[in-house]
Image (cartoon, grey):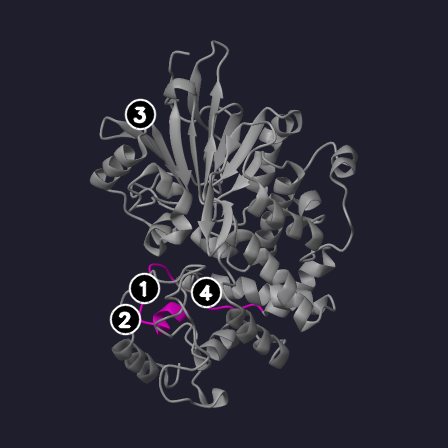
Amino acid sequence: MPGLTKVLDVLRKVLPSKPRNNGLVGSNIAKNSDQAAGAAVPEHMLPPPPVDFLEAIGFEMEEEAVSDFPSTIDLVRADRAAGIEVISKTRVDRATFLRNHSSLNTKILAGALTVEILEELISDILARKVDDNGKWHRRMIGRAGVIIPGDCIHHNLGRNLSLISDLHGHQLRLDDIITQVEKGLRDGTEELHNAGDLIHAEKRENVFNLAWSLQTFKAYVMLMWLFPGQVHLYPGNHDIFCPTEKHFNVVMDFVEKNPQGDIAALVQHLMYRGYITNPNEIEAMKISKAGQPQSYLFLHYLCLSLKESGATREDIWGVIDLFQKFVNHLPVCLKAESENKEIDLLMAHSFPKGVKKPYALDEIRSDEKVLEHTLWQREISLTDFTKLLRALGLSKNGTMIFGHNPDPNGAEWIFRPLGNQARLAIIHSNIDYRFGRIRVFKNDDGQYMILPFSRECHPDRDPLELTMAH
């Protein structure tokens, strides 16, 4: 592109060469600015934005960028024509909804989510410290002068658990999972726990399929409301898409100024306003696939969709703020153990490096570094794994279950012993053929088992069983 080389050369000299994981919801060090780093240049005088926004901030590409940008407004209008809305305005009664829908799927669930349901869920998350049936509890902690439930759900394995992670907007995979767990949810014998990353396509060819991310997010939230205390979500790094009102304002300003603009034009606008290229940009807003800033793309899509529905700027912010507040208040991890520790496990989006005592799980959001690791940690060393195992008091047969981390050997997911002590499981539930679902249950002989299941609900490969005498 004309003039781009010189711009990139300058940017690479003044910006760090590696991404900084300093941007987390609630972080005090990730404060953005509306001023560009350097002398202000009129937006219309900026050169065309690069095809890959990561290249503009000095990161190396691991895959080829998408160069054909559909107009976001065209995506919005096509989805609205197909009946997809950001939020429903029809009030819903829980019992009536379940009675009227004998079989659930993402389309039915997503189409029913309302502002009132989101508000009720947030209030419930902040207030609920124990399951109605006594299967789990959250310890109460003090934060910012308020007593609230802690960041960990402590479970006694009184129900069967289905554990999933990293759906990444794969609506069909969520449909499969609902099919497998719905009966148990309805009869109260099953729980569904999700280690995050509900949104943002993982396949490059789906990067502009924003409707699936929206539908997957809304459907799972609706499941949580329909089955309180049975369906849980622990946030992942991809679930942060509007960390501050400033991020909303900069995107909404673009929407009002250029409603026909595509993501390339939005990137240019963001760079002019001091986002993306600002060293203090929140890390979650740099997440990309095929060269596209997925968090900004999703935020742009939401703003446009709500504007097309006739919502005012104030109302648009109200809905998006509720979406992000819901994520911000979620517990961060699950720690489960049966009576007499016949079986025990820890589940989170990623490895909570830095946790040194069991009670620290309840205060992860109070420690920015530990929260950063819990959302972003890629490498899990045997030394760190062993330290955490001991810090949490997990048994020699304990299992740690995370998403986020790809298998370096190219397998869809991992379920294996680590260091001849405990097991490490990595789940990616968006895989086409053998997505990860781990089930924790008692077999007919009363023995606890942890089994990986495939899409067809059969043990995947050679079943690696963790069996303890009851």
Q: Is residue 70 visible?
A: yes
Amino acid type, callout 1: Pro
Mark 2 and mark 4: Cα distance apart in space: 20 Å
The reply to whether dot 2 and dot 1 touch (C-beta < 8 Å) is: yes
Badge 2 is on which residue?
16
Q: Which residues are magenta?
A: 52-70
> Spatial distance from mark 3 to mark 4, Cα to Cα?
43 Å
Q: Cα distance, mark 2 to mark 1? A: 7 Å
Q: Local crowd at mark 2 within 10 Å, few (<14), some, or many (≥20)?
A: some
Camera-near label (2 vs 4) is 2
Mark sitting earlier along the chain (2/3): 2
Badge number at residue 395: 3
Res 19 label: 1
| Distance from the alpha carbon under mark 3 to that under mark 1 | 36 Å
Helix, strand or loop for disc 3 = loop
**Mark 3 or mark 1, earlier in chain:** 1
* Residue to which mark 4 is pinned: 292
Where residue 68 sits: x, y (%)? 50, 68
- 174 over 447 or under it: above or below: below
